[in-house]
Image (tube, rainbow, N blue to C red):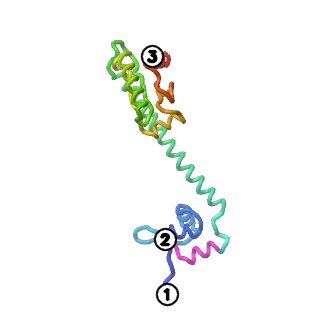
Amino acid sequence: MSEELLTLAEAADALGVSEITAKRYIYAGKMTSIKLPGGQHRVPRAEVDRLLSGGAQPGAEDVMEGLEDRIGELESALEHVTAELHVLAAWCARRQADLPEQCGAPAVETHTLEVLGPGCRKCERLYEIVQEVASAEGVGCFTVTHVKDLNQITAYGPILTPALVIDGAVVSAGRVPTKEEVQRLVKSALG
């Protein structure tokens, strides 16, 4: 008679823990398993029963240890992304000097005008107005984009659309301002 073997997922479910925690038990020696040639673990049913009946049942310390490990992994990933962003920022700063002069004057900044909205009629109207204002103010001085992706829109926080964003700051939301209002908003945001 052969012993019943459980997959890691089945063993974790029976123990009431995650698969990661069950695997941690195996590597810590708290639970034995049979490792298959493909690297998968099979846990004897008797081992799960032993853990459930004995004092080796998962406790708060194990859960906390798992959470602390995960937090450490996330912090490490965040440090990596931060380092990558610093490298990218340095590269962009070096490339800024290589950009051609725009707007007929040396060292003129390019400003970003973004219209936030999923593509409704009001959003399209605001986008048209912003393009007109940007063209009148100086070709090449402004980058005008229409942001329709909801994830990008929500990154600005809870706002009503259509919204106008100038160089990363929301200056109008929930309505379509007139062309004159957009001109004033652009001039005031740019100083």
Q: Is residue 164 left or right of residue 25?
A: left
* Name of the residue lying farthest toward the top: 105
Are there few (<14), some (14-19), or many (20+) residues within 10 Å of tag 3? few
Q: Is residue 144 left or right of residue 1?
A: left
Residue 45 among those drawn in magenta = yes
Question: Closer to the N terminus: mark 3 or mark 1?
Answer: 1
The image position of residue 89, as x and y in percent, is 43, 31
Q: Which residue is mark 1?
A: 1
Q: Badges 3 and 1: C-beta atoms under 8 Å apart? A: no
SS at circle 2: strand
Question: Closer to the N terminus: mark 2 or mark 1?
Answer: 1
SS at circle 1: loop
Indicate whether 60 appears above or below 159.
below
Q: Which residue is mark 2?
A: 7
Q: Badges 3 and 2: C-beta atoms under 8 Å apart? A: no
The image position of residue 32, as x and y in percent, is 54, 72
Question: Closer to the N terminus: mark 3 or mark 2?
Answer: 2
Q: Is residue 61 left or right of residue 101?
A: right
Per the picture, the main secondary structure of the magenta-coloured stretch is helix
SS at circle 3: helix
Q: Is residue 55 left or right of residue 2?
A: right
Residue 64 placement: quadrant: bottom right
Numbered tag placed on residue 180 in the rendering: 3
Of badges 3 and 2, the one in the foreground is 3
Q: Pick whichever, 90 or 180, lies toward us.
A: 180
Residue 41 among those drawn in magenta = no
Q: Residue at x 45, y 68 (%)?
A: 40
The amino acid on which the numbered mark 1 sits, given as a three-letter code, is Met
The amino acid on which the numbered mark 3 sits, given as a three-letter code, is Glu
Q: Which residues are magenta?
A: 43-52
